[in-house]
Amino acid sequence: MDQKGKITEADVLALLARHFAAPGYAFIPHVRNGTGFRQRTTRTADAIAMSLWPSRGLHLHGFEVKVDRSDWVRELRDPAKADDMFDYFDFWWLVVSDRKIVADGELPPTWGLIEARDKVRIAVPAPAISTPRPLDRIFLAAILRRATESLLPDAKLKEEFERGRRAGLQDKREEKHYVLESLQANVAEFEKASGIQIANGWNLGPVGEAVMILRSLTPEAIRARLDDLRRRFALSLEQIDLVRAEAAKWGIGSENTPEIPECDRP
């Protein structure tokens, strides 16, 4: 679609290419009726498709694409434009992006109608042309030339692959450069805030441990630590009370506690 969201001729051709796709068909866009200067009047079919299965009929289809009402009206005013190509084909189709482009009664009786928006829909089946003209060498040359132009040779594929590989490597280098710059900026910010010069052989192990401890000192962690210390202190007080109670049973710690002889003291 174009910037205004309108379906373009390229969109329609892409839908036709998917519908008339290999291996059932050979689809070629923008085929002229001749090459060089031998052809007095040059016409172009927006696309052609050849069915490739003998069991289904080796038929040649021609397509005239219209995505605008005014363009179709101009076509109606110049019927000879299509007639120069029409006779070669078994079926001739008008392909529109919107059914409303063609008013009632405007479609020639020997044409079929296809609507191509999100997919290809046959609105009016094309009648078979009873006696199509045999392909002459000029038209055959035009078909083969366009087919050759539409295909990418191995050398071109390799060239595109290499170009993509180089672009990928460049992207990786740029990504690494960006990461390095970001890391350098973070180190500089840390050195400025901490007063530590990492590049001067600072002992980073203890520094890292200290940073880890500081990061762990969240309010939640501090509260948990204090709660743990409170529980430990409470247990210690309970143990002290138990010891004092046990000692009291033996009279230890009271005024009547017998004096331990000096020699028996450890």
Image (cartoon, rainbow, N blue to C red):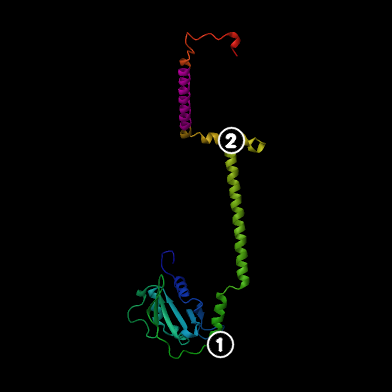
Q: Quadrant of residue 93?
A: bottom left
Going by the image, does 31 lie left or right of 122? right
| Dot placed on the residue nearer the N-terminal end, 2 or 1 | 1
Q: Magenta segment, principal secondary structure?
A: helix
Q: What residue sits 58% from the left and 42% below the top?
A: 185
| Residue on which disc 2 sits | 209
Please, what secondary structure does the residue beneath circle 1 have?
helix
Relative to 139, residue 162 above or below: above
x, y percentage for residue 136?
53, 88
Residue in the image at 46% along x and 82% along y:
61
User: In this orientation, does residue 193 appear?
Assistant: no
Residue 240 in the magenta stretch? The answer is: yes
Split into 4 quadrants, where in the image is the C terminus? top right
Q: Is residue 72 visible?
A: yes
Q: Quadrant of residue 206?
A: top right
When the figure is inspected, residue 152 is found, relative to residue 219, above or below; the finding is below
User: Callout 1, which amino acid?
Assistant: Arg
Task: Decide which of 221, 134 is in the foreground and name it.
Answer: 221
Q: Identify which residue is drawn at 56% across, 81% down.
A: 144
Q: Could you classify mark 2 by the number of other residues whose Cα lies within 10 Å: few (under 14), some (14-19), or many (20 or more)?
A: few
Query: How far apart are the two marked residues, 2 and 1, measured between alpha carbons?
Result: 84 Å
Where, quadrant-wise, is the N terminus in this rendering? bottom left
Magenta span includes 245: yes
In the rendered image, which residue does mark 1 sit on?
A: 137
Residue 224 image position (x, y, % from top left)? 46, 32
User: Range of the magenta residues?
Assistant: 222-246
Element at label 2:
helix
Image position, residue 53 (x, y; %)? 50, 83
Of circles 2 and 1, the one toward us is 2
Q: Residue at x 54, y 85 (%)?
A: 140
